[in-house]
Image (tube, grey):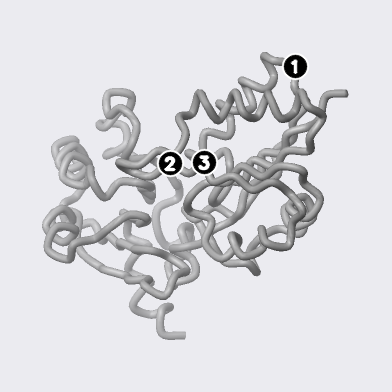
Amino acid sequence: MVGKVYIVGAGPGRKDLLTLRAYELIKRADVILHDELIGEVAELLKESRAEVINVGKRSGMHRKSQEEINEMLVDYAKKGKVVVRLKGGDPSIFGRGGEEAEFLARHKIPFEFVPGVSSAIAVPECVGIPLTHRSYDPALVFITGRESRERLNWKALAELNATIVVLMGVGKVAEITKKLIENGKDPETPVAIIEKGFSEDQRVLITKLRELADTVERERVENPAVIVIGGVVELYSLLSGC
């Protein structure tokens, strides 16, 4: 009998922001394949009876390739296992959850998405930067620093009055800044960099778009970091102290 794969979001790293559905699945799984950046949720894996496998990928260090992970999901499911594929944040927000679901579907393996709280939203919000506000930009755009730049319409992005949230973009800030400003984005646009959100090493840096790359270099910002570009960053000075 074929098992089932649950593509589960672990949330932004805090145990109390894990969904109840995700927690229940962790406890009853036969196998858990988890990413690197799951924070405190890693502690909960000790409560599971499952075989726990770290398949995390970070810059410069891949325990398993995406192809290997895909094959593992299929192999375990074909053995009748309940498999939890545990991903940081939400599995479908730059988490390759869609790619894995596509692979499972092509191999006739039952699967289910279990949403998680995305760090793209939770990290700015919890430091005092709500990503939408009626007094600021009426649109919200998420981009990733790890995908091919050619696929982005920089002119449209720069001209859109939208708050831009960049994930995994620390190594590409110079390029991102250059493209936005060249295509019309105001160099004075406020920017927040939230480094290592929800950890003891969390740090918030406030700057301007024209100074973003210099700030990242000078302050030696490291991933994981969420970068927020937009007027809404102005609220940080008021809301962060509450």
Q: In the image, residue 29 lies at what x, y percent?
A: 77, 46
Q: In the image, residue 154 lies at what x, y percent?
A: 26, 32
State the residue lying farthest toward the bottom. Answer: 242
Question: Label 3 neighbourhood size at 10 Å, few (<14), some (14-19), many (20+)?
Answer: some
Q: In the image, residue 89 lies at what x, y percent?
A: 55, 51
Label 3 SS: loop
Label 1 SS: loop
- Judged left or right of residue 176, residue 49 is right
Residue in the foreground of this view, choosing between 151 and 51: 51
- Judged left or right of residue 65, residue 209 is left
- The residue that appears at 74% across and 30% down in the rendered structure is 111
- The residue that appears at 31% across and 54% down in the rendered structure is 229
Q: Which residue is mark 1?
A: 108
- Judged left or right of residue 61, residue 42 is right
Do the residues bearing badges 2 and 3 touch, measured as CB atoms within 8 Å? yes
Q: Which residue is mark 2?
A: 57
Tell me how far mark 1 sits from mark 2, CA to CA: 26 Å
